[in-house]
Image (spheres, rainbow, N blue to C red):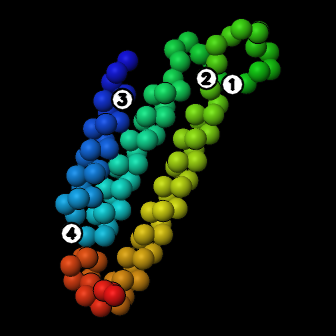
C-alpha cells in the first residue's frame, strides 16, 4: 500500500535533482515533467479504493463502494496544466534560441537585465 507513495517521492526527487543540475532549458522541461508526474501518481494513490467501481450511478445498488471522481478531475486538471506550462516554457526556449543561438542558460548573456 505504501509503494505508490514511495514511487511518487522518488519521481519528485529525481525530477528535482534534474532541475537543479540541468544545463539546458529543454532538459529542464523534461525534468519538470518527471517531477510533475509524481503528482499524478500521488493523486491516483490517494483516490484508489480496492473493489470500488467507477462513479457511474445508473444501475448500481445503493451502498456500493465507488471511486472519488474529484481525485480523477484533479489528475486530469494537473495533466492539462502541466502540458500548458511545458508548452509555454518550450516556446520561451525557442525564442531565446532565436535571439542567442543557444538553449543553455549560461550562454544567454543577451537576456540578462
Q: Which residue is mark 2?
A: 67
Q: Is residue 92 above or below residue 60?
A: below
Q: Are marks 4 and 2 in contact (CB under 8 Å)?
A: no
Q: Nearer the viewer, mark 1 or mark 3?
A: 3
The Cα atoms of the two marked residues, 1 and 2, are separated by 6 Å
Q: Are marks 2 and 3 in contact (CB under 8 Å)?
A: no
| Residue 62: image location, x then y, percent | 76, 9
Q: Which residue is mark 3?
A: 5
Element on which disc 4 rests: loop
Q: Which residue is mark 1?
A: 55
The Cα atoms of the two marked residues, 4 and 2, are separated by 42 Å
| Residue 15: image location, x then y, percent | 29, 50
Q: Are marks 1 and 2 in contact (CB under 8 Å)?
A: yes
The Cα atoms of the two marked residues, 4 and 3, are separated by 29 Å
Left or right, 40 with reference to 53: left
Q: Is residue 96 above or below residue 39?
A: below
Q: Is residue 111 visible?
A: yes
Q: Which residue is mark 4?
A: 23
Q: Are marks 4 and 1 in contact (CB under 8 Å)?
A: no
Q: Nearer the viewer, mark 2 or mark 3?
A: 3
Q: Earlier in the sequence, mark 2 or mark 3?
A: 3
Q: Are marks 1 and 3 in contact (CB under 8 Å)?
A: no
Amino acid at each position: 500500500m505504501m509503494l505508490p507513495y514511495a514511487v511518487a517521492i522518488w519521481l519528485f526527487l529525481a525530477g528535482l535533482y534534474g532541475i537543479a543540475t540541468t544545463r539546458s532549458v529543454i532538459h529542464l522541461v523534461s525534468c519538470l515533467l518527471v517531477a510533475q508526474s509524481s503528482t499524478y501518481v500521488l493523486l491516483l494513490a490517494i483516490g484508489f479504493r480496492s473493489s470500488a467501481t467507477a462513479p457511474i450511478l445508473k444501475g448500481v445498488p445503493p451502498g456500493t463502494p465507488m471511486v472519488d471522481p474529484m481525485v480523477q478531475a484533479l489528475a486530469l486538471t494537473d495533466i492539462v496544466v502541466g502540458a500548458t506550462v511545458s508548452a509555454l516554457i518550450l516556446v520561451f526556449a525557442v525564442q531565446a534560441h532565436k535571439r542567442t543561438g543557444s538553449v543553455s542558460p549560461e550562454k544567454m548573456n543577451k537576456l540578462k537585465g
